[in-house]
Image (cartoon, helix red, strand yellow):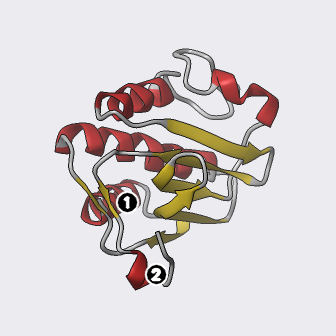
Amino acid sequence: MSALATDVAEELARDDPQRDVQLSIEPGMAATGDPQLLRIVLVNLLGNAWKFTSKHEQAHVSVGTVRDPEHGPAFFVRDDGAGFDAKYKEKLFVAFQRLHAQEEFPGTGIGLATIQRAVRRHGGDVWAEGEVDRGATFYFTIPDLHVSYSARGEQP
């Protein structure tokens, strides 16, 4: 997963070289799953992070793992971009339910629904936290997630 996230991030940076995005990708992340579906998840999540930070001169995007109290080990993609109003978070993963105007942030409105389908095909779950103008964090689980907690100083 770390290598896949790095590849996707490098593609985004190559396609938009004028952007100043500080990217942090946790090393050693791994999961067992369909590589094409996992790539789709990261393309959409990192693409959204890239897009929704575009109004900032400097942006920060990070990819890593956490232990969620409810879901267990999970991956996350966090940005400091446009964010979203938490009262609409139930609409995030519904196709064509956009929280931002097309003129402000272009897109098809199916990216997050696609992510949810790909994650659920692996038996996982996806959820998000955000705050308007303070960024967003998208989390997802893959049941066969391999996290090296000892490398990060955490215990499972």
Q: Position of residue 44 (x, y in %)?
A: 42, 40
Q: Position of residue 12 (x, y in %)?
A: 38, 55
**Nearest to the observer: residue 115 or residue 48:** 115
- What residue is rendered at 31% in x and 38% in y? 40
**Nearest to the observer: residue 114 or residue 143:** 143
Residue type marked 2: Arg
- Using residue 11 as the reference point, say whether residue 48 is left or right of it: right
- Using residue 109 as the reference point, say whether residue 7 is left or right of it: left
Callout 2: SS: helix
Label at residue 152: 2
Is mark 1 in CB contact (under 8 Å) with mark 2? no
In the displayed orientation, state which residue is furthest to the front. 156
Spatial CA span between label 1 and label 2: 22 Å
Q: Position of residue 123 (x, y in %)?
A: 34, 33
Local packing at callout 1 (Cα closer than 10 Å; few below 14, some 14-19, many 20+) is: many
Label at residue 9: 1
Tell me: residue 76, above or below residue 143. below
- What residue is rendered at 75% in x and 26% in y? 88
Tell me: residue 91, above or below residue 24. above
Local packing at callout 2 (Cα closer than 10 Å; few below 14, some 14-19, many 20+) is: few
- Using residue 103 as the reference point, say whether residue 94 is left or right of it: left
- What residue is rendered at 37% in x and 47% in y? 42
